[in-house]
Image: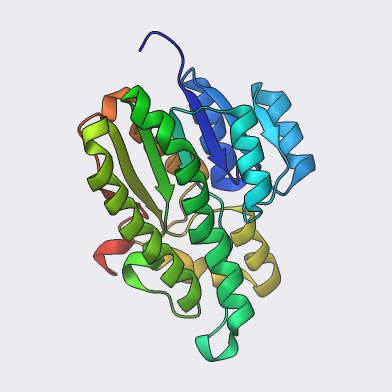
């Protein structure tokens, strides 16, 4: 490709999203990202020379306005996500709507916004950050797992519909990753949380955001031209079951 790809990452201010922003910037892409965390977003934008928008991914009007102003994009990474640890009977309709709005409906909004350009150009890379919870289920996270399972089905459908346009769509499924959210849980509930998460994996450790970003970087690149409709676990073997 003669010109640098333009990449959009949702939820890019911290954790996996920030690592993806840095990875794609190092790969020579022109990076734009959004996040509700304006202070962290602005710091990262200054660091890597990116376009940052402090918007809520569930605000359809704000999303549409920003996409029109900042686009078009050749690469989309739907990373924005939120979790809630609670047994299903302790959740309510408001919890269900909130988790689906961030984890699934925002994926719809951004994909719907960028696809027409990708189709017209005949090139595009869509990478959706799902979760092993969407493939395996999650004790204490039924709503989150349902949303991420929806992301998996959506990804494969987009891959089927858009292969003829030269647009690929793949999902990355992180397992236990050492993100600010996990670190907060360990701080609040103790080291047993870390041990329990590590024991879910075959490698007996937490992953890093950079390890997830490396896989995203490949899927977002021209080198991944024959990879589409896939769900790739970055979970230390979690998908294989305990050793």
In percent of width and height, residue 134 lies at 38, 66
Question: Is 7 placed above or below 97 here?
Answer: above
In percent of width and height, residue 57 lies at 62, 51
User: In the depicted view, which residue is nearer to us: 164 or 20?
Assistant: 164
Q: Quadrant of the C terminus?
A: bottom left
- Residue at 71%, 49% in the rendered image: 36
In percent of width and height, residue 109 lies at 52, 50
Question: Toward which corner of the image does residue 46 lie, by quadrant?
Answer: top right
User: In the depicted view, which residue is nearer to us: 167 or 205?
Assistant: 167
Q: Can residue 84 be seen here? A: no
In percent of width and height, residue 6 lies at 50, 24
Q: Can residue 96 be seen here? A: yes
| Left or right, residue 148 beside residue 37 | left
The number of discs equals 0
Q: Quadrant of the N terminus?
A: top left
| Left or right, residue 228 beside residue 19 | left
Question: Is 140 placed above or below 179 here?
Answer: below
| Left or right, residue 51 beside residue 169 | right
User: In the depicted view, which residue is nearer to us: 162 or 171?
Assistant: 162
What is the residue that sits farthest to the right in this orientation? 39
- Residue at 33%, 70% in the rendered image: 136
- Residue at 40%, 42% in the rendered image: 127
- Residue at 58%, 53% in the rendered image: 179
Q: How is the image coloured?
A: rainbow
What is the residue that sits farthest to the top in this orientation? 2
What is the residue that sits farthest to the bottom in this orientation? 89
């Amino acid at each position: 490709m003669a010109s640098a790809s333009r990449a959009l990452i949702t939820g890019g201010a911290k954790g996996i999203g920030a690592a993806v922003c840095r990875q794609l910037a190092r790969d020579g892409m022109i990076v734009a990202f959004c996040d509700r965390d304006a202070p962290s977003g602005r710091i990262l934008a200054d660091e890597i020379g990116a376009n940052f928008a402090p918007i809520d991914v569930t605000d359809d009007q704000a999303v549409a306005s920003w996409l029109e102003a900042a686009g078009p994009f050749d690469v989309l990474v739907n990373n924005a996500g939120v979790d809630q640890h609670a047994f299903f009977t302790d959740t309510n309709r408001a919890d269900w709507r909130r988790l689906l709005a961030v984890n699934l409906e925002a994926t719809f909004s951004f994909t719907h916004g960028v696809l027409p350009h990708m189709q017209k150009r005949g090139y595009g890379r869509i990478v959706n950050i799902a979760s092993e919870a969407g493939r395996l289920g999650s004790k204490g996270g039924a709503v989150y797992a349902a949303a991420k399972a929806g992301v998996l089905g959506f990804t494969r459908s987009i891959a089927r519909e858009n292969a003829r346009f030269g647009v690929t769509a793949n999902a990355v499924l992180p397992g236990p990753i050492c993100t600010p959210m996990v670190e907060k849980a360990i701080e609040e509930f103790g080291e047993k949380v870390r041990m329990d998460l590590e024991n879910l994996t075959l490698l007996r450790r937490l992953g890093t955001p950079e390890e997830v970003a490396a896989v995203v970087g490949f899927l977002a690149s021209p080198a991944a031209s024959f990879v589409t409709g896939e769900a790739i676990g970055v979970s230390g073997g979690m998908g294989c079951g305990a050793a």
